[in-house]
Amino acid sequence: MDNLARKLDAITLEKSGVLRLTLTDFRNYPFLRLNLDPSPVIITGENGSGKTNILEAISFLTPGRGLRSARLADIRRIAPALVNDEYAPTEITPYNWAVSAQILNNGNEFEIGTASEKSSKETLEDGIKTFERRIVKINGAKVSSQAELGKYLQANWLTPQMDRLFRGGSQPRRSFLDRLVYAFDLEHAKRTANFEHMYREWYQLLKSGKADKNWLSSLEENMAGIGVAIAAARREQIAKLNSFIEKEPDDVFPNVVLELDGTIEKLLDTLPAVDVEDYYKNLLRQQRKNVLYNDSVDGINRTDFKVYYKKKRMPAELCSTGEQKSLLISIILAQSKCQTLYQGFAPVLLLDEVAAHLDDLKREALLEKIRDLRVQAWITATDAELFAPLRGYAQFLEIKNGCLFR
């Protein structure tokens, strides 16, 4: 056993995961409570039965917008409407949703939870405006930032939508990369949210034609500072994962090379951060006219996350569907091992229909790696027999008519 294996083995001896999960008015569940142990959880059931909703609920116990990137207002339970003269296809309950859990982290237990609540603010244009906001509690006490959740629970996920990650636009790949960064830099989520807010304000001011030049300059200076910090964090995470994969290549899943394709990230290869900030600030000023003519604006919001199949020297977008799925799994496994080593506890894996596009060899290899890593993996499928090698080790649950059976 090499040094890395020894370190991982020592850390994962202390299990981490979800011991109790409670959902209230979340998606199709009016109420659901699961009592568990930190071993893997296999959830089976027909399509549309609510398997993915359980994984999404767990993802909301970590920083960010969950595995579907859904709006808070869209998560409230949807119930069938009554069939009458005023029939409507769905009826949304007036209640706010909530997710809470008892977490085991490195031998210690914690209570964490998150929920949506209505809030309001006064605006000059519309008077009182109501909106949904997310609240977070740790051990019963409300905390000011959802980033605090990352100290207690980390999660990495794969969903069927991500099977097209390498063939679509760059935005989903940036989001995937930023999720990887969150695990090591809890402030990264706050920085990306702040940048997006300032970018929208900057864009709307320019479109209105009523922008104050001093206010624009102030926004551009702040955007440049936060943007360079985001780019630096992305570069650090890419370097960390590339180094880890180089030293500890996987024996089954293809090894990858990760790369950032972005103007600001590339400038940080050769220039000090302060000089890159000045460059970015001037770049934004020069691109004001691009907004007016609906042209693209270069910067960290245009950066692409590139993945290459190392052995074949081939970009991921040119690989087969099965190879692309294997490349994603390779990244997730490397990320999970890195997190375990750096943070001292293993992340939870949320694997939605992960068996799709995997041959028997790779599916069984993935299950073996889950067992070896001793992580709590939540896996969904329509066929429980695909995961027969985990019987006696994992917890098997079946969903029927919105109810779970063991």
Image: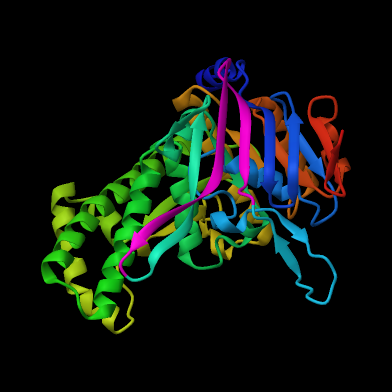
Image spot of residue 220 (x, y percent): 19, 62
Q: Where is residue 295 in the image (x, y as percent from the top left)?
A: 32, 80
- Asked if residue 4 lies in the magenta stretch, the reply is no
Q: Nearer the viewer, residue 132 or 20?
A: 132
Residue that extends furthest to the bottom in the rendered view of this protein = 293
When asked about the image quadrant of residue 90, the answer is bottom right
Along the line of sight, which residue is nearer the eye, 237 or 79? Answer: 79
Residue extending farthest left = 214
The quadrant of the rendering that contains the N terminus is top right
The answer to whether residue 247 is visible is: no
Q: Nearer the viewer, residue 288 or 252?
A: 288
User: Which sits in the foreground, 248 or 262?
Assistant: 262
Assign the C terminus to one quadrant of the image. Answer: top right
- Rendered residue at 20%/61% (across/down): 219
Kindly identify the residue that appears in the image at 73 percent across and 31 percent down.
40
Is 84 above or below relative to 79? below
Q: Is residue 328 left or right of residue 55?
A: left
> Taking 294 as reference, is 194 above or below it?
above
Relative to residue 134, is residue 221 depicted above or below? below
- The picture places residue 316, in percent across and down from the top left corner, at 55, 59
Q: In this view, does 276 lie to the left or right of 235?
A: left
Magenta segment includes 123: yes
Disc tally is 0
What residue sits 85% from the left and 29% below the top? 391
Q: Is the magenta stretch mostly helix, strand or loop?
A: strand
**Residue at screen point 38% across, 52% down:** 193
Magenta stretch: give its range.
95-124
**Residue 19 appears in the figure:** yes
Percent from the top left, x then y, of residue 32? 75, 39
302 relative to 134 in the view: left or right: left
